[in-house]
Image (tube, rainbow, N blue to C red):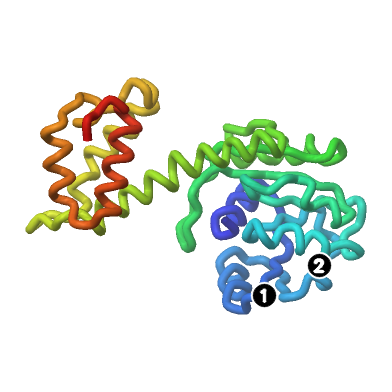
């Protein structure tokens, strides 16, 4: 997240004045890449000049870190997390104003994501919400207000639509019978066309394949090709989710 968020903040006019990380390698790499003037491994070294403290950390560490910031942050500072699944209430022990800036996108180390078209979902205390929303609109043209309960529902949908589908891509790449001279890249035109149509026509109107057609002969041939029972169970279960009348 930080690898893409820092340059996005800078591009939008934000002054990133400090980086705090326990990893010396991360501090060095980020500071050199983005010309951040101050760095530290300690929360106690947090600059009092920082108006926003943005946490790009694993979900399970948000609440403990917020508690550690109690007595360090001033009431005029704003503590922000970027998680899709963590309630804003987890920030309250910090004693500061609280906000959430959740960019719904995949972030990969060393790959900078262009924020301009990333949906950003914003929540915050009344004192800081307007400024967080305005700045988010400099990051992206797609900014939406959303409370913690709504964000959790959105995050669930993101996991199903993105993470689970990626698992199936991996399953196709790693476990299906090899075909000489071909690799996973052969599926790229198929997958890109499917994704385009999903958002043009909706998922309900774009389901294809032998299950929706009720082509039991093809389904049984596919099952015979799968060597492991857990693979056959997954294939059968998914097929029945598409068409529960299949006799397989």
- Residue 46 numbered tag: 2
Residue 117, given in percent of the width and then of the height, sits at 51, 37
Q: Is residue 142 above or below residue 234?
A: above
Image quarter for residue 229?
Answer: bottom left
Residue appearing at x 37%, y 51% in the figure = 167
Q: Is residue 47 above or below residue 181?
A: below
Residue, x 51% and y 45% (percent of image)?
Answer: 105
User: 202 or 219, which is in the foreground?
Assistant: 219
- Is residue 150 left or right of 174 when viewed as pictured? right
Regarding mark 1 in the picture, which secondary structure is present there?
Answer: loop
Residue 91 percent across, percent down from the top left: 79, 52
Q: Is residue 176 above or below residue 40?
A: above
Crowdedness of circle 1 by 10 Å Cα count: few (<14), some, many (20+)?
few
Total labels drawn = 2
Residue at 58% across, 55% down: 7
Farthest residue to the front: give it: 247
Left or right position of 118 against 246: right
Residue visible at 20% across and 24% down in the picture: 213
Which residue has dot 1 on it? 22
Residue 101 lies in quadrant: top right
Q: Position of residue 107 (x, y in %)?
A: 50, 53
Q: Quadrant of the N terminus?
A: bottom right
User: Sequence order check: which comes first, mark 2 or mark 1?
Assistant: 1
Q: Which mark is residue 222?
A: none
Q: Which element is circle 2 on?
A: loop
Q: Nearer the viewer, residue 81 or 5?
A: 81
Of the 4 image quadrants, the one containing the C terminus is top left
Picture coordinates of residue 174, whole percent (x, y): 25, 59
């Amino acid at each position: 997240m930080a690898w893409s968020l820092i340059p996005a903040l800078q591009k939008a006019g934000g002054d990133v004045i400090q980086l705090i990380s326990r990893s010396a390698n991360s501090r060095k790499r980020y500071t050199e890449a983005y010309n951040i003037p101050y760095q530290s491994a300690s929360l106690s070294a947090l600059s009092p000049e920082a108006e926003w403290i943005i946490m790009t950390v694993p979900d399970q560490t948000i609440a403990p870190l917020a508690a550690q910031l109690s007595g360090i942050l001033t009431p005029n500072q704003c503590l922000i997390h970027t998680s899709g699944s963590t309630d804003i209430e987890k920030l309250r022990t910090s004693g500061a104003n609280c906000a959430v800036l959740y960019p719904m996108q995949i972030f990969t180390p060393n790959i900078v994501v262009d924020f301009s078209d990333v949906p950003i979902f914003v929540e915050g205390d009344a004192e800081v919400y307007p400024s967080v929303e305005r700045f988010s609109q400099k990051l992206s043209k797609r900014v939406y207000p959303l409370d913690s309960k709504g964000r959790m529902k959105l995050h669930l949908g993101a996991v199903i639509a993105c993470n689970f589908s990626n698992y199936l891509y991996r399953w196709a790449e790693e476990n299906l019978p090899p075909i000489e001279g071909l690799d996973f890249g052969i599926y790229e035109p198929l997958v890109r066309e499917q994704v385009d149509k999903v958002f043009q026509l909706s998922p309900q109107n774009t389901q294809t394949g032998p299950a929706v057609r009720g082509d039991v002969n093809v389904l049984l041939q596919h099952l015979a090709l799968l060597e492991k029972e857990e693979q056959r169970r997954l294939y059968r279960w998914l097929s029945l989710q598409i068409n529960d009348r299949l006799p397989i």
